Image (cartoon, grey):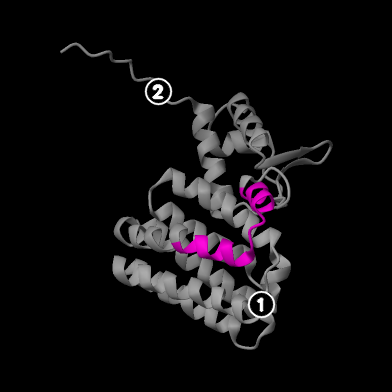
């Protein structure tokens, strides 16, 4: 049987730069509003040409992950919940509620948590642990720790080793944590909720670190149920 095969092409340098910068943004290592290194410094740090860096940055700008400000530099773009995000558009056209959104999290996060337990590498475990430490530090400083929370859930997505899961979760959490930030603040106004959330994240982390798929699934389910039941009890519907 004769088959048509295509020669394997080496990955372009600019694509490798793009992949590395995109991962830093998705993981939350480069945070919204943060300025990235100038082209020259990036090229030196990555040991590549400035042209390769420029091409990668252009691609990230087109994707909406970076923005270039004249005379200032290049910055990680702050997600806008009401424009460009496909989930935000869908929510508006379907008149979906906050409960609808949280119910979707059951499917988007429980099974992937079990996959993460099966596939997580040592570096994935380190990212998860770092995110929890950042959350705890933020909370102790009187803040909500929202960005660290996002990084934790994105680290789980990366640990699944499924690129579609990473892309979907990035769009999901950009919308969830920016578009309904006002509603999320209700969750933290009740004494003890922040500590409960931290404990739940720690439980998820321990299950993944132990490579226990069933326990990871259950821990994530418990966490999402807690948030969902809170909003149901307060009858908070608006997104």
- Identified at 28% across, 15% down, the residue is 5
Residue 159 position in % (x across, y down): 40, 55
Q: Within the magenta stretch, is there residue 97?
A: yes
Q: Position of 238 compared to 53: left or right?
A: right
The front one of 236 and 117 is 236
In-image side of 82 versus 156 (left or right): right
Query: Where does residue 218 sit, x and y in percent of width and height?
Result: 37, 72
| Residue stretch in magenta | 87-106
Say which element carries label 1. loop
For the stretch drawn in magenta, the main secondary structure is: helix
Q: Is residue 135 visible?
A: yes
Which quarter of the figure has residue 207? bottom left
Q: CA distance from mark 1 to mark 2?
A: 54 Å
- Residue at the outermost bottom position: 191
Q: Residue furthest right?
A: 71
Q: Looking at the image, is 210 positioned above or below residue 83?
A: below
Q: Which residue is label 2 attached to?
A: 10
Residue neighbourhood size for the residue with mark 2, other residues' Cα within 10 Å, grouped as few (<14), some (14–19), many (≥20):
few
Magenta span contains residue 31? no
Q: Residue at x 72, y 50 (%)?
A: 80
Residue at numbered disc 1? 235
């Amino acid at each position: 049987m004769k088959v048509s095969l295509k020669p394997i092409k080496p990955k372009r340098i600019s694509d490798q730069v793009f992949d590395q910068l995109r991962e830093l943004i998705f993981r939350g290592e480069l945070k919204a509003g943060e300025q990235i290194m100038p082209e020259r410094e990036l090229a030196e740090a990555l040991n590549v040409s400035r042209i390769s860096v420029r091409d990668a940055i252009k691609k990230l700008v087109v994707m909406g992950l970076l923005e270039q400000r004249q005379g200032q530099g290049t910055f990680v773009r702050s997600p806008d919940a009401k424009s460009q995000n496909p989930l935000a558009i869908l929510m508006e056209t379907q008149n979906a509620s906050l409960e609808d959104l949280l119910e979707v999290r059951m499917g988007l996060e429980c099974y992937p948590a079990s996959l993460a337990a099966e596939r997580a590498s040592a570096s994935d475990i380190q990212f998860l642990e770092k995110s929890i430490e950042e959350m705890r530090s933020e909370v102790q400083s009187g803040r909500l720790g929202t960005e660290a929370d996002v990084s934790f859930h994105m680290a789980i997505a990366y640990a699944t080793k499924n690129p579609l899961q990473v892309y979907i979760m990035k769009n999901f959490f950009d919308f969830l944590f920016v578009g309904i930030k006002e509603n999320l603040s209700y969750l933290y106004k009740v004494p003890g909720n922040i500590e409960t959330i931290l404990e739940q994240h720690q439980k998820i982390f321990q299950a993944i670190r132990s490579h226990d798929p069933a326990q990871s699934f259950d821990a994530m389910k418990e966490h999402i149920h807690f948030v969902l039941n809170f909003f149901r009890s307060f009858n908070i519907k608006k997104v």
